[in-house]
Amino acid sequence: MTSTTTLFTPTAATPMSSHWRDFLALAKPGVVRLVVFTGLCGMLAAPGSINPVLGFAAILSIALAAGGAAAFNQWYEADLDARMKRTARRPIPAGRVAPKDARDFAALLCGASVLVMGLAIGWLAASILVVSIFYYVVIYTMWLKPRTPQNIVIGGGAGAFPPLIGWVAVTGDITLTPILLFAIIFFWTPPHFWALAMFVKSDYAKAGIPMMPVVRGERATRWQILAYALFMVPLAAAPWYLGTAGIVYGVASLVLTGLFALLAVPVGLRTSGAQDTMKPEKRLFAYSIIYLFALFGVLVIDRVLQNAGVIG
Amino acid sequence: MNENGSNRMTPEEEERFKKARKGRNLAIGGALLFLALLFYAITIVRMGD
């Protein structure tokens, strides 16, 4: 843990009265929802079928791993969270959960996730789950985030694992499509996160986190947001033109990603002034979440239509 | 330490603590029961493979 871990130090005489909702908050349910959705889509888009009980166990494992990794992140960054307005009310900096309890809770969730995945699906999927947890907790949270403005670029890999794991749970192997799904989330993460970082820049600066807008400045960040968003157009359509997804996905991905790139244009080209409301950045951030839900949703619809023989 | 600077809990704090502990225990109990049922279901399915 980083320097100021003693924001709240419970003693034996004053035990914590943490509510179960505080532990739920440690698992970042909002993030878990997106992770579960992409994992489920990876599973449903994969060729073949899976027993519903095993499918449920696989999705539960992905959710537990994401929740555990998020709790580890909050445990490790409790001192940074306390310095930022956006995160100061989280359970550890607010003193509602002891750091030690948060760490144990995180370890329990991660351990349970790997065990359930291994027993229900197999140890290849469980191994990828271990790698994803290690990637997020150690490589991203502990190593990259406090050191480099490229933290989000490489760290984005952590959020890209769920569809890969969902796919492997059904097929038992790794092919081109799950790698493309991984790449889509990997390259979506920087413009998504930097759009957020643009309007909470002062918070990150205060906490000493080397986010791109803080270290490289606004101009460089804006160009990179635009570059990544434009690159997403051919990338998101790749499952279609490489023949692993149908025309419904192809058209929808071009429309959805086209809009994503279109919203990134004003963000990329403008310069914010004093008292700027950052409307284009907020709009891009909000759309980026809807975009990912929609893109993966369409991938599943496309697979269902293909299986039903409606499209080729 | 409590709100009064003492190491002993006030009756209100104790009440709050007991309520939170009860909630946590129920959540843990529910999670364990759920996991037992899940492992049972996984075993039945895997045995049928």
Image: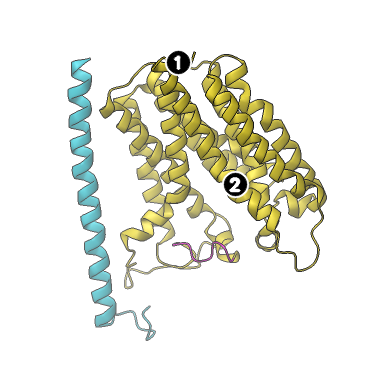
- Looking at the image, residue A82 lies above or below residue B30: below
Q: Chain of mark 1?
A: A
Residue A247 lies in quadrant:
top right
Seen in the image, is A279 located left or right of residue A28?
A: right
Residue situated in front as seen by the camera: A70 or B45: B45
Q: Disc 1 designates what residue?
A: A173
Residue drawn 68% across and 48% down? Answer: A194
- The amino acid type, in three-letter code, at marker 2 is Tyr
Query: Disc 2 or disc 1, which is closer to the eye?
Result: 2
Residue A72 position within the rendered picture, expressed as x and y whole percent measured from the top left: 47, 48
Q: Is residue A217 visible?
A: no
Chain A as rendered: colour: yellow
Q: Disc 2 designates what residue?
A: A287
Residue A25 position within the rendered picture, expressed as x and y whole percent measured from the top left: 41, 56
- The amino acid type, in three-letter code, at marker 1 is Asp
Residue drawn 41% across and 26% down? Answer: A43
Residue situated in front as seen by the camera: A10 or A271: A271
Give the SS element for disc 1. Answer: loop
Seen in the image, is A15 located left or right of residue A157?
A: left
Same chain check for tags 2 and 1 = yes
Q: Main secondary structure of the magenta part?
A: loop
Counting residues from the N terminus, which is met first, the one under dot 2 or under dot 1?
A: 1
Chain B as rendered: colour: cyan
Residue A255 position within the rendered picture, expressed as x and y whole percent measured from the top left: 62, 33
User: Residue extending furthest bottom?
Assistant: B4
- Crowd class of label 2 (few under 14; some 14 to 19; many from 20; radius 10 Å): some
